[in-house]
Amino acid sequence: MLAVGLLLTALVGAAGAAGPNLWGLLTMGAAASSLAALCTRTLVNSHLTLRAALAVSEAAARERALASTVFEASRLGIVVSDPEGRILMVNEAFSRLSGYRPVEVLGRHTNLLRSGRHGADFYAELWASLLSRGHWQGDLWNRVRSGELRRHHLSISTVRGAGHRPLYFVGMLEDITERYAAEKAVEHEARHDLLTGLGNRGLLMEQLERDLALARRHQRAVALLFLDLDGFKRVNDRHGHAQGDRVLQLMARRLQGVLRETDLLCRLGGDEFVVLVSDGDGDEELLQIATKLIRASEQPLSPLAGDLSLSASVGIARYPDNARNAYELLAAADRAMYAAKARGGGCSRIAGQIAAQAGD
């Protein structure tokens, strides 16, 4: 400490002896040092700011590259449109899905895929959902470039800007045609008879419940005609079950051929069929239908089983006269059918009444 003090004293003394020039030099040197330090600090700060800016830019570039990669690599068809529905961008998957190249769709309206299978109300609801909730998703039919109708699952999201104003719509399309067909096939098998293709008991009861609900509301009648083939056992015994199945298929076509489009024909199993008549108000009309069914069943079986002939017994029951619900109505028609069969077959009987012989 003493040495430092002596050194400082010597320097001050020397400066005093040297006069004002030395003091000026010292002052300028100090100022220059301060300026250099300031410049150094500024350069360091600028460098750090530049590095941060470069890092942000690189991150943004990586995000854009990633978004571009996802856009092009997505297995879903992606289409970006403006608020008026004009197409701005599509990816490769959209081109594969629709058959349209990007140059063919850019600037065109998104309705270029419209199939004609959906009404104006469908699309009005779609756009209303986009504008109010910002998204819509569902299944629809589209017509692709080849003219083929394809089933697509579509999900649309709204990209909004300042003031919550829509800037873009981003749609994502997935082709579900094959899956849809498979689901429909499973549904059809669950509700239809595999041998004849007619509706089965499940479909009958489902439709009957709907018709009864409408009948109660509008004070209408609903009728069932329960038909059993007379003598069918002989076909199986003499010609085998394979040939018997062919006879049932033939009979299904014949019975269907004499019914109206509004009547539902179902096979319950074996040689039992049921016809649902949703507007079965009059006995006379129901008896006429029964007569047509019986005559169709009596047609020759050549070449399947030409040595045999069949007929049919038909029982008729009507809501609300003979039953209060679907199961009671089916049971009443079944009982009426057995009453007709007890009379020798080849005739019809209305539940609670004795029906005239078919054809009388």
Image: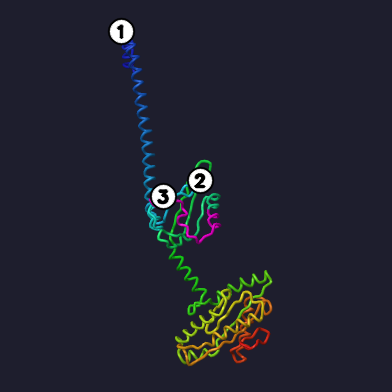
Q: In whole angstroms, how far apart are the C-alphas of marks 3 and 1?
A: 85 Å
Q: Name the residue under label 2.
A: 166
The stretch of residues the image draws in magenta is 103-126
Q: Quadrant of the C terminus?
A: bottom right
Q: Name the residue under label 3.
A: 106
Q: Where does label 1 land, which residue?
A: 18
User: At 67% across and 71% down in the image, what residue appears?
Assistant: 216
Q: Where is residue 200 in the image (x, y as percent from the top left)?
A: 53, 77
In percent of the image, x 68 and y 69: which residue is there? 218
Q: In this view, does 122 lie above or below 10?
A: below
Specify whether 105 is left or right of 260: left
Q: What element carries label 3?
A: loop
The residue positioned 49% from the left and 77% from the top of the image is 197
Residue type at numbered disc 1: Ala
Quarter the N terminus occupies: top left
Q: Mark 2 to mark 1: distance in Å?
A: 79 Å
Few, some or many residues within 10 Å of mark 3 (<14, 14–19, 20+): some
Label 1: state its secondary structure: helix
Q: Nearest the camera: 310 or 158?
A: 310
- 117 drawn magenta: yes
The mark that comes first in sequence, 3 or 1, is 1
User: What's the residue at 38%, 48% (across, down)?
Assistant: 68
Q: In front here: 27 or 157?
A: 157
**Is 277 placed left or right of 100 in the picture?**
right
On screen, residue 357 above or below 201: below
Nearer to the camera, 96 or 334: 96
Check disc 2 and report its element: helix, strand or loop: strand
- Do residues under tags 3 and 2 come within 8 Å of each other at their CB atoms? no
**Kind of residue at disc 3:** Leu
